[in-house]
Every structure is written in C-alpha cells, then in structure tokens.
Image (cartoon, helix red, strand yellow):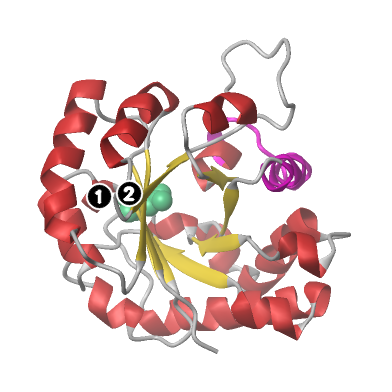
C-alpha cells in the first residue's frame, strides 16, 4: 500500500515570531512545488498565528505541539483545541516523549487528547517510543504495544483513520544517536501489527508511521528507504530552513 510521506518539523520551545516568519519566508521558496511528501511545521503556540499566516495557501501545513484534552476551561497555561483551530492550524502532536517525561503525560491523558483532536478535526501525530533502559531490558515491543493500546483502545477504525504515529525512541531524541534504519523498521513493524490487531489491517496498512530522533540531511535518505518508514518528525535539524528543506527533498 502506498502511503504519502509526512515530513514534519518539531520546533520545540525555539524561535520568536520574527524568527519563525523569517524561517517560513526562506523555507517556502525552497520547497515550492514539492508534492511528493506532505510538509508540516509544529511551532510553539505563541508562534502559530504568524506561521499559519505565512504558510497560508502554500504546500506547508501547520500544527500545534500540544493541546489540552478539554475543549476550553480553567486550565492556566494550557492551549485549547478551539484556539488552535481558530488560528488555522490543522495538525497537533500528541504525547511527545518530552511531554510524557517532563509534564507527566500518561497513556490515559494521551488517549483523551487524541479523542479531542479527532473530535475537532485536527490531524493527530501520536508520539510513542521506548526509553533507553526499556530497550536494554528487551522491553521495546511491550512498551510500544502498551502505548498503542493506551491511546487507541476502544476506538473505531473509522475514527482512527486520520491518525499519524511517530515512532521516536527516547534515546535517539536530541542525542545525535539515530536508530539504524533496521532498528526503526523493526519497531515500525511491531507498531503496525499492533494497530492491525486493534483497528484492522485496512487502517493499519494505510496509517502513516513516521520516524523521529536525530533525523538529519545526512541520514534521512537511508531511513526513508525503509518501506515501513512513512516520514520523519525532525527536531534540531528542522530549525534551519536549509537543513529542513534538504530533509524534505531527501
Ligand atoms: P531531534 O528531535 O530531531 O532533535 O532528535 C526529534 C523530536 O523530538 O521530535
């Protein structure tokens, strides 16, 4: 089954609005007419209005890095799905490992956020991945299965259809240590098989599974050569327009 790749930039807590605008002004001409892959930028919430305005009518989509599971409410410091939608973002990351590690996001919270994103029509990119200790203890497959069941359990195949998964081994994020294409490919096969068990082979075969963790212009081609890898979620190497454009055009 052919799946259109998604190459996504996770800017984390970097850039001011002026820097974000300068990035987009430089980046768009570099990827103009690029239709082989979908492209998306995930800036901080305060940057979303500037970035969605700058990307308007281009081939680059924009998403939030996080949403709250409530539609709106007394949740100081959080960002609601209505706010994200109102500034024309179309995607959201959910359950990034930094959210899980530093902000206490559990599988149960990820599930609630996923439900909210789908209800309000955002394309969710659900991030999963094992920690180094878990890999070394031979627990990679069981961790991935737990995270998938936690997020998707009880969902209907029709509801799940827009979901994108990002496999991001925590030991490869921001460390310069990339999973080999074979390690990533193996993990992606475990993930797809688990999705098939929960949601059926049709949904599993069509679902895009991105790889994330120290993706760079130098290693993207080998990663994308794996049939199981349907795109990349890029942190550090997405902050510079030349570098991210080189990744998009691997
Ligand atoms: P990295 O981050 O590319 O800097 O490793 C990836 C991510 O956290 O999404």
Identify the residue position indicated by label 1 in the image.
238
Ligand 1 neighbours mark 2 (CB distance < 8 Å): yes
For the question of whether residue 174 can be seen, the reply is no
Left or right for 47, reference 104:
left
Nearest the viewer among 232 and 156 is 156
Left or right for 148, reference 58:
right
Q: Reply above or below: 97 against 146.
A: above
Left or right for 210, reference 57:
right
From which residue to which does the magenta span run?
A: 101-119
**Quarter holding residue 36:** bottom left
The label number, if any, that marks residue 220 in the structure image: none
Task: Provide the secondary structure element on which disc 1 rests.
Answer: helix
Q: Pinpoint residue 116: horizontal percent, then vertical percent.
A: 73, 39
Judged by its main secondary structure, the magenta piece is helix
Residue located at (75% from left, 47% from top): 111
Identify the residue position indicated by label 2 in the image.
235
- Magenta includes 108? yes
């Amino acid at each position: 089954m052919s799946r259109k790749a998604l190459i996504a930039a996770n800017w984390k807590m970097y850039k001011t609005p002026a820097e974000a605008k300068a990035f987009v002004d430089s980046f768009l001409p570099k990827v103009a007419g690029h239709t082989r892959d979908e492209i998306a930028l995930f800036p901080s919430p305060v940057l979303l209005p500037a970035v969605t305005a700058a990307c308007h009518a281009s081939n680059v989509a924009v998403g939030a890095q996080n949403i709250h599971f409530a539609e709106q409410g007394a949740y100081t410091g959080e960002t609601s799905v209505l706010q994200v939608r109102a500034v024309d973002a179309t995607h959201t990351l959910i359950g990034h490992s930094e959210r899980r590690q530093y902000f206490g996001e559990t599988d149960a919270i990820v599930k609630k956020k996923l439900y909210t994103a789908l209800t309000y029509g955002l394309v969710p990119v659900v991030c999963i991945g094992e920690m180094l200790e878990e890999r070394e203890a031979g627990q990679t497959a069981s961790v991935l299965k737990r995270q998938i069941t936690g997020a998707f359990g009880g969902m209907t195949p029709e509801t799940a259809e827009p979901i994108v998964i990002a496999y991001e081994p925590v030991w490869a994020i921001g460390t310069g240590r990339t999973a080999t294409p074979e390690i990533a490919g193996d993990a992606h096969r475990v993930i797809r098989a688990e999705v098939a068990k929960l949601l059926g082979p049709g949904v599993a075969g069509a679902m895009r599974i991105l790889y994330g963790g120290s993706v760079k212009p130098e290693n993207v081609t080998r990663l994308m050569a794996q049939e199981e890898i349907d795109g990349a979620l890029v942190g550090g190497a997405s902050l510079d327009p030349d570098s991210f454009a080189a990744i998009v055009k691997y």
